[in-house]
Amino acid sequence: MTIEQIKQVITGGEWISIVPEVRPSLSRNDDGSAKPFYLSRRFTYQADDTFTLEIINFADAYGKVPLARLFIKGHVQWQGDHPIADGAQKVDFTADGAYEVTPLHPGFVAVLNQFASSGFNAWEVNSTQSILGKAFTPFGLAEGQIFKEYDLMYVLNGMLFWGARHVDGRGFDTEENRPTNLQIPMVRPY
């Protein structure tokens, strides 16, 4: 598909995770392997190249224990063909509209109050705070930094694929770290 064809397919409406998804994190198990983290995604794309993304992080593989809700709003920059598959496109996601965190579990609240207290109100369950442009240690964000990911999009058979996380947990924070594999797809809800 061309960029314009992908835009037509993904514009308007929501795209959601089929099931909770697993990602490798930068945190390590005792044996040195990457600790998994689990999430679900809800994505919308508009014709003006804006997007919203809601992510729910879970403590478990079945998505029964929610830890946090992230809400991101920003812009998509289309960068051209990606070699992973015919019709795949390089995209950059810039979270320049909103980046909010809502802790959903007391354990995550405790982590935030320990590692992300400077410049924030005390974290509480179900209380949303903006991290846009703020130093936020848990996500590795520096003061004034706007979150950006160098990703990809691919549409096949009514499914929307993005890039799979690197097995070592690295983010997509540079062009060199752009993904080279496909993640589990999102679909339109029925």
Image: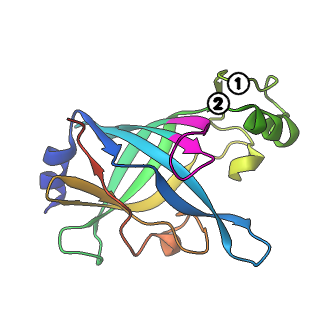
The location of residue 153, given as percent across then percent down, is 30, 59
Residue 70 belongs to the span the image colors magenta = yes
Name the amino acid, label 2. Leu
The quarter of the picture where residue 12 lies is top left
Mark 1 packing: few (<14 Cα in 10 Å), some, or many (20+)? some
Total marks drawn?
2
Q: Which residues are magenta?
A: 56-71
Q: What is the secondary structure assignment of the residue under circle 2?
A: loop
Direction from residue 180 to residue 190 in the image, left or right = left
Residue drawn 68% across and 65% down?
26
The quarter of the picture where residue 113 lies is top right
**Dividing the image into 4 quarters, which one contains the C terminus?**
top left
Depth check: give the residue in front, 5 or 161. Answer: 161
Residue drawn 54% across and 40% down?
64
**Do the numbered discs 2 and 1 sit on residues whose CB atoms are within 8 Å?**
yes
Direction from residue 91 to residue 62 in the image, left or right = right
The location of residue 19, given as percent across then percent down, is 39, 49
Whether residue 141 is visible: no
Residue drawn 45% across and 45% down?
40
Q: Vertical placement of 101 versus 150: above or below?
A: above
Whether residue 132 is visible: yes
Pointer 2: what residue?
Answer: 104
The location of residue 74, given as percent across then percent down, is 44, 38
Pointer 1: what residue?
Answer: 125
Depth check: give the residue in front, 66 or 8. Answer: 66
